[in-house]
Image (tube, rainbow, N blue to C red):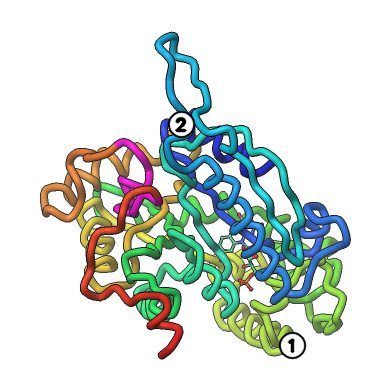
Amino acid sequence: MRSRQFASLDHLSGGRSAWNVVTSWDAFTGENFRRGGFLPQDERYSRAKEFLDTAHELFDSWRGDEVLADTAGGVFLRDAKAGAFVHRGPHFDIHGRFDVPRSPQGRPVIFQAGDSDEGREFAAASADAIFSRHATLVEGRAFYADVKARLAAYGRRPDHLLVLPAATFVLGDTDAEAEEQAREVRRQQVSGATALKHLEFVWNRDLSGYDPDGPLPDIDPVVAEEHISRGRAQVRMYRDPLATAREWRELAEANQWSIRDLVIHTGNRQTFVGSPRTVARTIDHFVQSDASDGFILVPHLTPGGLDPFADRVVPLLQEWGVYRTEYEGTTLRHHLGLDHPDEPSSADPRAVPAGEAAAR
Ligand SMILES: Cc1cc2nc3c(=O)[nH]c(=O)nc-3n(C[C@H](O)[C@H](O)[C@H](O)COP(=O)(O)O)c2cc1C
């Protein structure tokens, strides 16, 4: 089902589809997508790997020249076995006939977004790009070095897996104007209700009776296995809720912050704030310092939020020769500099054959 959707999307978009293969961080979503409940972390990744491998088997069942176009624009099959697949594994046992011919990219571009050790291994083995959350220079460099170092074990080169953190931005005519606007955006993003919800992740109890413009709760967080968010990531993010609560109370008292002020100050901020020149320079510095291979921009306004970036930052990057001025191919794979599965990979002296890597 999923393979058919992605192969169709790849056809419809002329080879510009990508698939963010996520295992999901909360049990609520996990249960919704899998009969039998949310699996433990390591099993989630082994299932994801088999899921993806199976999808690839389906995509690849149309490899080669089975399809010929007839003069009327229709297609007919040269090889009656095209699309036939059999997969037997611990998670999936399926066979049949895949009915979508080979798409322009062969396979959609595969993204991976998990951050644990298992998630990083999954990306190193199977993904074309990682949608990461490490958007500061120091964290970005450490993450970049870590995941790139995992590739050789799978016979892959560093450029086979792109590190593309999510990044937000606020532009102004001057750096000061951009800072002011960033503060305004943040206030609008964090409403009183949002601030209370955020605090509940740490306190693990209903705080809806508290005034978001008042002081932090003086009761302590509930430390328990069962979490109010029914998820795991937030629990892991605040491994020690009692210590986090203490630290936040001290911060709020020292700065005279309300609940909402605290969430605004401690939550994720905009990644790049400044004049177009400042933002372009910072982005270039990240890429040149191996903190990322680029960014996935997440504008705070939809639609149209990307326009100022395209109009004011991209021309500077192009002027400095660090961003393309024209497309050389038509597919997303091509734009990202990734190999096409049907084309032999370009020779690279750093390449390590899989067998040799495994033997090391
Ligand atoms: C930057 C980032 C983006 C993510 N996007 C999604 C998403 O869109 N949908 C989703 O269900 N999970 C998403 N996840 C959750 C991950 O796929 C993964 O399930 C979660 O992080 C738990 O795995 P981990 O312990 O390996 O990080 C995202 C995670 C990260 C770090």
| For discs 2 and 1, the disc positioned in front in the rendered view | 2
**Residue at horizontal 60%, vertical 77%?**
118
Q: Residues within 10 Å of mark 1 (few under 14, many from 20)?
A: some
Asked if residue 259 lies in the magenta stretch, the reply is no
Residue type at mark 2 is: Ser
Mark 2 to mark 1: distance in Å?
49 Å
Q: Nearer the viewer, residue 37 or 87?
A: 87
Residue 336 part of the magenta-drawn span: yes
Q: How many marks?
A: 2
304 shown above or below 357: above
The picture quadrant for ligand 1 comes to bottom right
Residue 176: image x %, image y %? 30, 58
Amino acid type, callout 1: Leu
**Percent x, y for residue 92?**
75, 58
Q: Quadrant of the C terminus?
A: bottom left
Answer whether labels 2 and 1 touch (C-beta < 8 Å): no
Mark closest to the chain's N terminus, 2 or 1: 2
Please state the extent of the stretch shown in magenta in the rendering: 330-341
- Quick check: 293 left or right of 106? left
- Residue 305 is at least partly visible in this image: no
**SS label for mark 1:** helix
Left or right relative to 216: residue 278? left
Dot 1 corresponds to which residue?
Answer: 242
For the stretch drawn in magenta, the main secondary structure is loop
Residue sitting at x 38%, y 78%? 152
SS at mark 2?
loop
Q: Which residue is mark 2?
A: 13
Q: Residue 216 location, x and y as percent?
A: 72, 74
Above/below status of 301 relative to 150? above
Nearer to us in this view, 257 or 12: 12
Q: Looking at the image, which is closer to me, 171 or 76?
A: 76
